Image (cartoon, rainbow, N blue to C red):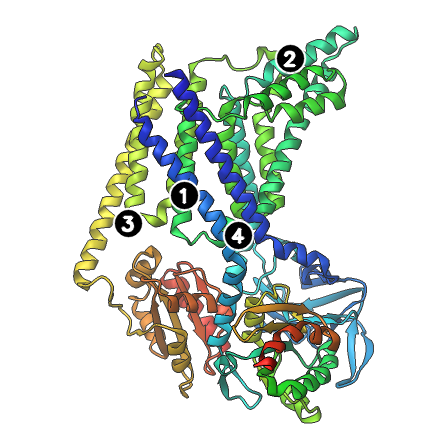
Amino acid sequence: MFSRMFNFSKKITILLSLFFISLFINGAIGNESLFIKDKNDFLQPDAAFQLTINKNTQSIEAAFLIAKDYYLYRDKLKVEFDRIPQKQILLPVAEIKTDTHFGKTEIYHGTLNVSIPFDKNHPPKEISISYQGCSQKGLCYSPIKKEFKFDNIQSINSNAFSSTSEVDTMQFLLQSQHIGLILLGFFIGGLLLSLTPCVLPMIPILSSIIFASHKRSSQQTRLKDFFLSLSYVGGVAFTYTLLGIFAGLSGNLITTSIQSPMLMGVLGVIFILLALSMFDLYALKLPHFIENFIATSILRVEGGKYLNVFIIGTISSLVLSPCIAPPLAGAIIYINQSRDFILGGLALFTLSIGMSMPLILIGIFSDQVLPKRGYWMILVKEFIGFMLIAMGLFIMSPLFPENMDQIAYSILLLSFSIYLFMANRRFKYSVLSWVHAIAFATLMGAILLFGVTLQKIKVLDNENISNTTKSNHVSVLPFKQIQSLDDLSRELNQRDSKMVMLDFYADWCVSCKEYEKLTFSNTKIKEHLAAYTLLQVDVTQNKAEHKALLKHFNLYGPPAILFFDKQHNEERTFRIVGYKNASQMLEHLKTLEHENQ
Amino acid sequence: MKINKSSLNLAIYILAIIFLGFSVFRIFSTPTEKSTASTAALFESTINNPEGKPQSLKQFQNKIIVLNFWATWCEPCREEMPELSNFYTNNQSKNLVVVGIAIDEEKAVKSYLKKTKVSYPIFVDEDKGVTLSKNLGNHDGILPYTVIISSQGIIQKTIPGRIHQDQLDAILKPLLQPSKSL
């Protein structure tokens, strides 16, 4: 039995390493463009023209830092406040360049400070700056438009993001404001890990290092213990950060083909497999000879010196006990998806710091302060297992029939609560009230989620009955259905001066249904939209022509609403991706119409 | 925990095969998949000529295309235009076309073309031009940006920045040869 179990673990380990190898191979392929980019001797537009925005009481100050040999055109610099073009822009005197075609043109080199005054009583909420520039090395950049939103933020640097539309702004939010949340999540994850038996093998290593240094010098201080453990933790964090950076750099596979259902399925299964190891169904390990090799080399490195301790830290994080691997693999897959190596490095750094908290505490207080080891640690470990299953479900959720994902979540919650109820018996615990409390809470949560989902299914069912056939859904608005780019260009080539709204719809898209039910059905919105030519693409079947349409507009899928002006050019900045309720939509339409008057 | 080990094993083997298959598939499929997909969108587009009339880019399908993104305010773009113009006149008979897409205002392009003779077709659309060039790999919005597409619709090379006559000759020589021998 045991040997078969071992065989089984080996297989899973091989499987997972195969998966990671293919992940990295794929990443390398996808990153070709990255290496090519390095070969060219031009800067990225945001590096060529670094823009910083500051808001004063009466003006917006825009400061450009223009790279050497690059320049900006004076007459192409445009500023809008809340989508209204500003005429009063205070610009410094420009240099004169003689252009063979235009004659004398005004340009800026080096630094450029622009001041745009505004009415003190009506400070702008949103400003957009457009600019154009070139390099003397023989290239120019397409017009660049940056949008900034002022809520409480006083100063923004453009390097953090580039935005040409709402979609990009959204991505920026994901990148910068949520970065704190993401990192906090990783830190908490690390703390949770530190409460599992996973980190235990590190404690004797560190204790022995500290003990060894006690032996050597008589004037051992608490401070030195602390610094020793700090450098050990530094070593651990170093390895993890490298891992994170690597994962971020190689990430391309998942983002480019996240649409592919097969990959979603495979990833979801991977997460669930990883979770199984948290329940000790099998162990994820490095091959034995590597483990032995590292373990012996740790023993050989002399303790007590900071650099050595650092090195021990970097190495010993590789040999950690089996149970750290699954959550770590999960984290790496997540980072891989973000394709952001800075985020990746930071995330795994915070994870390792969270995980090393007990090690730091040992350094300060020796190991008396640590919570007592016990069965509860296994509970925490298996809780992480449940989390991994939830993540697997989350990844696979687009594959499930409508609402089935929520049913799956509620079943998972239910099994977690059953698990907790049983845990007390399993560990022969004397009454552990908090475990019972949590078990009860999750039970309630499971029931609640289940109920809400059932309710939702009922609502959608009713809707389906009224719409009779599923594939030919009927909208509350008089949309003209189109299928392909040809259809679209035929519609757009019609010589009327009506604005056009193009809606991407799919049966499986919940927000699309909400649009129908809550937004489009609003009478005020109907009134507004009466003046538009209304086009809709139903991409439920995801035919090649649907994909071509989505690709043409750089969209990933519904929900998405595009607007075209009276000349039938797309109003790129007015794209809506995601859900807007009736009042938000009304506001959006009003600004759009205001601009097109 | 009692789980049927042999069926689990089977599942693991199947998964392993799927992984390997998937990565092998990607290794072989990526380059071609990438380039035909992005030109498909190109040929599906319609774009205005300087007179403001929409034209379908499908007319250039099955030809060797030198697609040049430019703007009137971009000096290096204007520098390379006479060379491209010459190149087009010399190779017009060989199933080759040079296409200029201006990321610019219609007015500016119109007045520019009045002063400067360009032998190849020019189209204008500031927004569409940006999207098209992005779809063809120009993520930084570089101008000029030249894309060389084979008659099969496969992207052969993309050149950000000023292109030179000898560069063009070198890239296009192998593409032009087979049609000569026919």
Q: Are marks 2 and 1 on the same chain?
A: yes
Element assignment for label 1:
helix
Q: Which residue is mark 4?
A: B27
Element assignment for label 3:
loop
In the rendered image, the vertical position of residue A235 relative to residue A173, given as above or below? above
Element assignment for label 4:
helix
Q: Residues within 10 Å of mark 1 (few under 14, many from 20)?
A: some
**Cα separation between marks 4 and 1:** 18 Å
Q: Are marks 3 and 2 in contact (CB under 8 Å)?
A: no
User: Which chain is indicated by disc 2?
Assistant: A
Q: Which residue is mark 2?
A: A207
Q: Residue A266: which disc?
A: 1
Q: Which residue is mark 3?
A: A401
- Whether residue B99 appears in this view of the structure is no
Amino acid under disc 2: Ser
In the rendered image, the vertical position of residue A167 relative to residue A433, given as above or below? below
Q: Give the number of the mark in front: 4 or 1.
A: 4
N-terminal of the pair, mark 3 or mark 2, is 2
**Cα separation between marks 3 and 4:** 32 Å
Q: Give the number of the mark in front: 3 or 4.
A: 4
